Image (cartoon, helix red, strand yellow):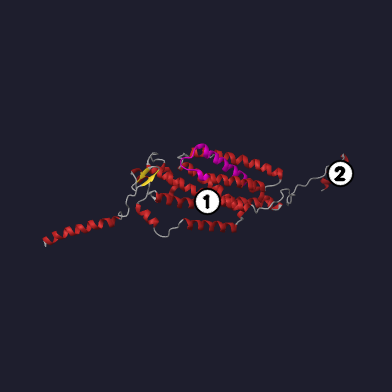
Amino acid sequence: MKSHVAESKPGAAAQSNHSTPTDTGHTDNQQCPVRVNGSMLSNAADSSTQSAVSGPQEKVKDSDQGWKAGKKEWMIIIVLAIVSLMVALDATILVPVLPMFCELYYIPFYLESVKDFSPTTTGVALMPLTGALLPTSVIVGRLMTKLGRYRWAIWLGWAVSITGTGLLILLDTSIQTYAWILIFVVVGLGHGLILMSYNFSVQAMADSRNVAYAAGMYTFARTLGMCIGVAVGGAVFQNELKEHLRELQLPAVVANDAENFVVRLHDFPKASVQYQAFILAYANSFKVVFEVLTALAGLAALLSLFIKEYTMDKELDSEHILRQEKQPSSPEANVEMHAERKRG
């Protein structure tokens, strides 16, 4: 019996050694080096990456199981959602605000992640955009009031907005400061033209007694477009970021919480290969978002061609009016008028 047990131990040890790779599940994860910006990036991250990326590897595997939606499937879902909302609301009002609010969300996101700006510096960096938007809205409003027409401002606004949104695609890891400042100025000019011109057009299309309802509907559509624009951009950005992280052999789970990971990304050594790889994945994902926004801006420009011209000179038609009494022409008439008031 002792010799039989002793002989069986090597076989058991051989079986345990043979089953160890299949139990751990790491036989398929070979280290495949990837070249990023002239450096070799290995599949195994260093200790700083392991401590920064939360969640075990099993979570990544579980998230990859099940139905996977590719780029085509996501684009189809997004297009169907936008078309459904166009049917529910006026497309000429809803679509124009989608790119604007999506840009106002993802431009600061780009500055904090790719350019490594702090929140305060990001706010200062947005001043060229807002500084161009607000004065343009005031000037365009005065011009439309003086000229009595608004379609020229809509079409000019979309021409400038498409140009500015297309220039946002150039934002990458190495763009110069003067370049993105000029791009932000162009984006602000386009949005300033569009915001004020659509506000005037909606009120000009409505009857005098329904102007308040039209203005309220425009505000509601603009707020709804804000929510939808950020959601559409988030769907595109998250899926693109997952693809680029997988290509660079980085944890794809980062894409599920990309905004909060930016805080941890600031702690990475700026010269490390892992930091450069993450920044590259973020920058490439932002480019795809801005490409989708450029397409939406082009669609909104085409829809604006169907906007009709209505006169902005309208008579006041309201249930509440001011009644002006006639002034007495002589002192005697003034005395008689006061006497009538006392009798009444």
Is residue 128 something that shows in the picture? Answer: yes
Is residue 220 something that shows in the picture? Answer: no
Q: Where is residue 117 in the image (x, y as percent from the top left)?
A: 47, 39
Q: Is residue 283 magenta?
A: no
| Residue to which mark 2 is pinned | 336
Q: Does the magenta stretch include residue 171?
A: yes
- The residue nearer to you, when weighing 3 against 344, is 3
Nearest to N terminus: mark 1 or mark 2: 1
The 10 Å Cα crowd at callout 2, few under 14, some 14 to 19, many 20 or more, is few
Quadrant placement of the N terminus: bottom left
Q: Which residue is drawn at 64% across and 41% down?
A: 138
- The residue nearer to you, when weighing 339 against 288, is 288
The 10 Å Cα crowd at callout 1, few under 14, some 14 to 19, many 20 or more, is some
| Residue to which mark 1 is pinned | 292
Determine the main secondary structure of the stretch shown in magenta: helix
Q: In this view, does 109 lie above or below 302?
A: above
Q: Where is residue 80 in the image (x, y as percent from the top left)?
A: 54, 58
Q: Which residue is drawn at 53% across and 57% down?
A: 79
Q: Position of residue 297 (x, y in %)?
A: 57, 50
Q: Is residue 291 left or right of residue 66?
A: right
- Specify the amino acid type for callout 2: Glu
Q: Is residue 21 left or right of residue 326?
A: left
- Specify the amino acid type for callout 1: Val
- The residue nearer to you, when weighing 23 against 264, is 23
Rendered image quadrant of residue 52: top left
Give the residues drawn in magenta, as a range.
168-194
SS under mark 1: helix
Q: Nearer the viewer, mark 1 or mark 2?
A: 1
User: Quick check: marks 1 and 2 in contact, CB under 8 Å?
Assistant: no
Q: Position of residue 107 (x, y in %)?
A: 51, 44
